[in-house]
Amino acid sequence: MCWSATADLAAGTGIAAVGVVSVSLAARRPRDLPLAALPLLLGAHQIVEAALWRQGGGTGPATVAWAVIALPLLALWVPAAVLCAAAPGARRRLLIPLAAGGATAAVLAYALATRPVSAEIRGHTVGYALGLPQTGPVVAGYLLATVGSLLLSGERGLVLFGVLVAAGAAVCFVLWREEYVSTWCAFAAVCSLLLTRWAARRRPVRATAA
């Protein structure tokens, strides 16, 4: 993933297909649907990046679409989806990452509306540039919203997902600092396949005939 247009397209198609299965498994629990749909969203995200590879980076529609999904949309989607699916006892603490996600999404959406975003093909990775003036607080808010909500969910499967995504964030930052957002989103897309298992285990049990 992230290494070529072909890799992104193949991985994105596979992950999106698994996302369809995840959504079907969660169909009887409407509160789980936003979180179960995350692999579908992240798979589509990788397909968008495949188009970006083919256009050679730059500032075209694929670049903007990729940035909108990766930045403001995920910052708000993940904590909101976790809050929807969480047990009542966990919802109060999940308001913290949701608030962080809302604030971070607002900052990122404003930046995308007022600044050009560009993509550059760098060997086998893609680097994105948005020109945020205060990167540190934005990254902290983004990680609190996405990773933090998973870790605070109290659900074993979601906590495991959060641990893997957090580990991936650290590895991607160390190894691919200039391409951090791209490589981390690809890693998160692969990890999101765990959500299919989570959705399957939360399906309502059918009553058997006496």
Image (cartoon, helix red, strand yellow):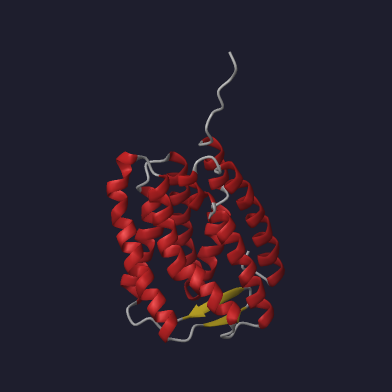
Q: Is residue 176 visible?
A: no
Quadrant where the C terminus lies?
top right
Compared to 129, does 29 lie above or below?
Answer: above
Along the viewing direction, whichever of 200 and 177 lies nearer the viewer: 200
Compared to 26, does 137 lie above or below?
Answer: below
At horizontal 61% and vertical 68% (from top left) the residue drawn is 2
Q: Is residue 119 visible?
A: yes
Q: Is residue 165 left or right of residue 152?
A: right
At horizontal 38% and vertical 50% (from top left) the residue drawn is 83
- Residue 205: image quadrant is top right
Q: Residue furthest front?
A: 209
Residue 87 placement (x, y as % from top left):
37, 40
At horizontal 40% and vertical 48% (from top left) the residue drawn is 84
Residue 13 placement (x, y as % from top left):
68, 60
- Residue 148: image quadrant is bottom left
Residue 72 placement (x, y as % from top left):
43, 69
Quadrant where the N terminus lies?
bottom right
Q: Is residue 207 left or right of residue 95?
A: right
Q: Is residue 208 left or right of residue 84?
A: right
Compared to 152, does 131 lie above or below?
Answer: below
Compared to 102, does 94 lie above or below?
Answer: above
Residue 189 placement (x, y as % from top left):
56, 58
Q: How many labels, in total?
A: 0
Q: Residue furthest top?
A: 210
Q: Is residue 28 left or right of residue 31?
A: right
At horizontal 41% and vertical 41% (from top left) the residue drawn is 155
Along the viewing direction, whichever of 51 and 162 lies nearer the viewer: 51
